[in-house]
Image (cartoon, helix red, strand yellow):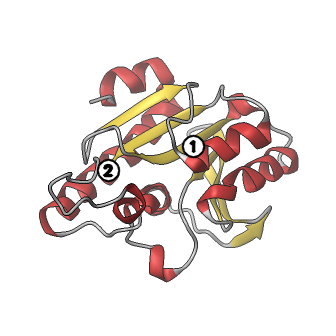
Amino acid sequence: MKLIIGLGNPGKEYSGNRHNVGFQCLSRFAKDNHISFDKKCCLSRTGSGRINDEEIVLAKPQTYMNLSGKAASQLLRRYNLKAADIIVVQDDLDLPAGKIRLRLGGSAGGHNGISSIITDIGTKEFIRLKIGIGKPDSRNNGTEVVDHVLGNFGGEEREIMDKAITRASEALTCLLTCGLDTASNRFNS
């Protein structure tokens, strides 16, 4: 069994935010695989299904981003899983908008949701699917990082991100069917 956690903030007011790209990707993946988020469990909205012979649980923590680890640790206990069984889908400021990268382990890189998960599950050794949201434009009146991640994608950027989310959904399927090395070689951009 694999647990795929998409990171984001709950509530309609956050649904289009850059910081919610993990939720957006998981919604796309669920739609592509006919999975609905029909349960509430472990501080999360969850859905389950199968990809080939692999049972999967999808989870969107309903804590705010900075407390995502609370949900992740409860989900691991509930399903009797180890960190090696989880995949976290996250936004990444250090990747240009629309780029994706699969990676095992590593630091939180300043991402508070990832930091919370590392703290609460006690390890950083889990797979991440990072979706680039780019850094704030320094010429844009000094937009702060918080304003950037909580801002919505606009116009051309939205089109780029829609394609990235589709590609990230495909990367998840490849990861589950072919493994990390093959998926990384195929999708890391």
Asked whether 96 or 160 is in front, the reply is: 96
Q: Residue furthest front?
A: 142
Is label 2 in a helix, a strand or a loop?
Answer: loop
Q: In this view, does 44 lie above or below 118?
A: below
Could you tell me which residue is drawn at 34 percent across and 68 percent down? 151
Which mark, by number, is residue 53? none
Residue 14 point in image, percent of width and height = 46, 74
Could you tell me which residue is drawn at 38 percent across and 55 percent down? 145
Is there a contact, CB below 8 Å, between mark 2 and mark 1? no
* Mark 2 surroundings: few (<14), some (14-19) or many (≥20) residues within 10 A: many
Could you tell me which residue is drawn at 78 percent across and 43 percent down? 120
Label 2 sits on residue:
133
Asked whether 149 or 50 is in front, the reply is: 149
Residue 131 point in image, percent of width and height = 37, 45
Could you tell me which residue is drawn at 58 percent across and 72 percent down? 10
Q: In the rendered view, does 29 fall on the left or right side of 35?
A: left
